[in-house]
Amino acid sequence: MELIVFIITAVVALIGAVAMLLSRNAIHSALFLLLNMGAIAVLYLLLRAPFLFAIQLIINAGAIIVLFLFVVMLLGAERAEDERDKIAWQRPVALGMGLLLLGEAIYVLFARPSSTLVMSSAGAEDFGAPVRIGEALFSTYLLPFELTSVILLAAMVGVVVLHKSAETIERGTQSAEEGAQGAER
Amino acid sequence: MVPTIYFILLSATLFTLGVVGVLVRRNALVVFMSIELMLNAANLALVTFAQARQSLNGQILVFFVITVAAAEVAVGLALLVTIFHSKRTTDVDEISTLKG
């Protein structure tokens, strides 16, 4: 039963990823990535990680993709890449190297004795429950937990600073244009 | 029971698709989305091994990876918007001012 759910969800995730790569419209790509993240969230549920299922949907699907959509619509970037690549052999070589990477990963997976790759079906009833994760976060992983708040603060400050410098670029070009027009008269 | 190897194969395939996306696409936003795809594939592998070894460390690491990925996307998109102000294009092939 779990195998059927896994196969359906894995197919959905792969369809989302391939469609994200192939779509010519960036908004469609973002929505296919949303589909992919939803499928991965369901896979987290299959892997006994209910807390991560919720976190994946809230943060990854609900905030990161929305941010992507905002920026795509803000920049008007949904147009397709019509012109040819500057390096003509870029696409074939990239596809070849991707296949090489996948082949290497599969080789490494199957070349070693897979004694460590056994799925353990037994386990505590509340394995991935928020209670257990909270206990670990606030005891063993307290330092990284506090540091993530510093990282998020740094990201917010960085975004505000970048927005301010973008404004001064705008105002600089505007005042340069006004100065040139005044000099012409 | 789903064998662990199936999850790891799916994670490897998604990661490879992300790598190909970064290399092939020219729209900077789709490149960012492919990077997010790679991060998600790695998260899937981490959660798989957390379940296989009955250890919560993998899930805690995924929690931190998701958080840091969110911060990185925010800063990366702000940088992209700033570049767009001067270049008026999101085509990564056009951003070649440092080319010799």
Image (cartoon, rainbow, N blue to C red):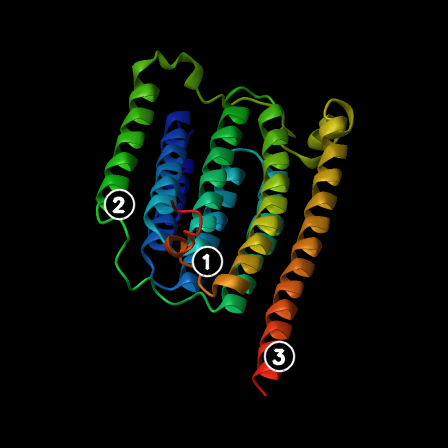
How many angstroms separate mark 3 from mark 2 (CA)?
Answer: 43 Å
The residue that disc 2 covers is A90
Are discs 3 and 2 both within one chain?
A: yes
Q: Secondary structure at mark 2?
A: helix
Amino acid residing under circle 1: Ala
Q: Is residue A29 visible?
A: yes
Rendered position, A58 above or below B17: below
- Residue shown at 66%/65% (left/top)? A167
Chain at tag 1: A
Which x, y percent locates residue A73? 51, 68
Q: Which mark is residue A30?
A: 1
The answer to whether residue A19 is above or below residue A183 is: above
In the figure, is residue A103 to the left or right of A153?
A: left
Q: Position of residue B51 (x, y in %)?
A: 53, 26
Q: Chain of mark 3?
A: A
Q: Is residue B69 left or right of residue A90?
A: right
How far across and down, in percent of the image, does residue B94 sit? 39, 57
Q: Quadrant of residue A175?
A: bottom right
First of labels 1, 2 by sequence position: 1
Can you tell which of label 3 and label 2 is closer to the viewer?
Answer: 3
- Looking at the image, residue A72 lies above or below residue B4: below
Say which residue appears at 43% left-offset and 49% top-offset. Answer: B31
Q: CA distance from mark 1 to mark 3?
A: 39 Å
Disc 1 vs disc 2: Cβ atoms closer than 8 Å? Answer: no
